[in-house]
Image (cartoon, rainbow, N blue to C red):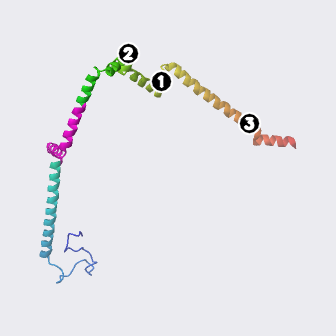
Amino acid sequence: MDERTTGMTSTGSEKTGHQNGTTPISASQPNASETAAQLEDDIEHIRNHLTDVASELDRRRHRFFDLPGQAREQLRKHGKPIAIGTVALAALGLGIWWWRSRSQRTVTGRLLSSVRDRLPDALTSGEWFEQARKRLAEAIHPEPPTHPVRNGLIKVSTAAAGAAASVLGKRLAGQLARSQWPSQDEQNQRAGLAR
């Protein structure tokens, strides 16, 4: 039995002393009404516990799926760093815009823009990068040749040459083996000639 089911005993003859599993009524054991009351108390305790667990799960579910509430809570918790980051990004963007507009008026800015104007268009537009990427991709994964008939003939001739070499090798190995180790008939013939 479970640890919460106090007052209940297991059925069987290990506690009773009788072979049929029945217990005689005695003063030390609780009666049926006390056992029923104890069971009702246990059931009520379990129900209360399950109600608490279910209400906690419901509260967590509502909190988890409350997205606008979570956004407000995150803004409340982290509002100051978010505001500082937004202002810093805006200041950075404005600073870059101001610097670029000012650099066109200075000597170094004009020098840089004249150098940029002398470069080929493909270099400044990034076309060269795309071409280099295509060349690298072709080197890594070359496209198969577009001659299917020639490829088929090469494959067939390679297979035929391999088969011919296999047959030739087998025959040469057989001749070599016969000359090294004569068969039983040849041994008998040689033995007959030698007698």
The residue that label 1 is drawn on is: 144
Q: Secondary structure at mark 3?
A: helix
Give how far apart the Cα atoms at labels 3 and 1 are: 44 Å
Circle nearer the N terminus (2, 1): 2
Q: Position of residue 82 (x, y in %)?
A: 20, 40
Provide the major secondary structure of the magenta segment. Answer: helix
Q: Nearer the viewer, residue 118 or 136?
A: 118
The three-letter code of the residue at mark 1 reads Pro
Relative to 141, is 106 on the left or the right? left
The residue that label 3 is drawn on is: 176
Query: In which quadrant is the C terminus drawn?
Result: top right
Query: In which quadrant is the N terminus drawn?
Result: bottom left
Give how far apart the Cα atoms at labels 2 and 1 are: 40 Å
**117 lies above or below 89:** above
Q: Secondary structure at mark 2?
A: helix
Q: Residue at x 14, y 72 (%)?
A: 38
Relative to 5, is 134 on the left or the right? right
Relative to 157, is 22 on the left or the right? left
Find residue 190 and report its image quarter: top right
In this view, the mark in front (3 or 1):
1
- Residue 42: numbered disc: none
Magenta run includes residue 115: no
Q: Position of residue 98 (x, y in %)?
A: 24, 26
Q: Position of residue 97 (x, y in %)?
A: 25, 26
Instruction: Give the number of marks.
Output: 3
Label 1 CA crowd tier, 10 Å (few <14, some 14–19, many 20+): few
Q: Is residue 137 in view?
A: yes
Give the extent of the magenta segment.
64-92
Q: Residue furthest right?
A: 195
Decide: marks 3, 1 in contact (CB < 8 A)?
no
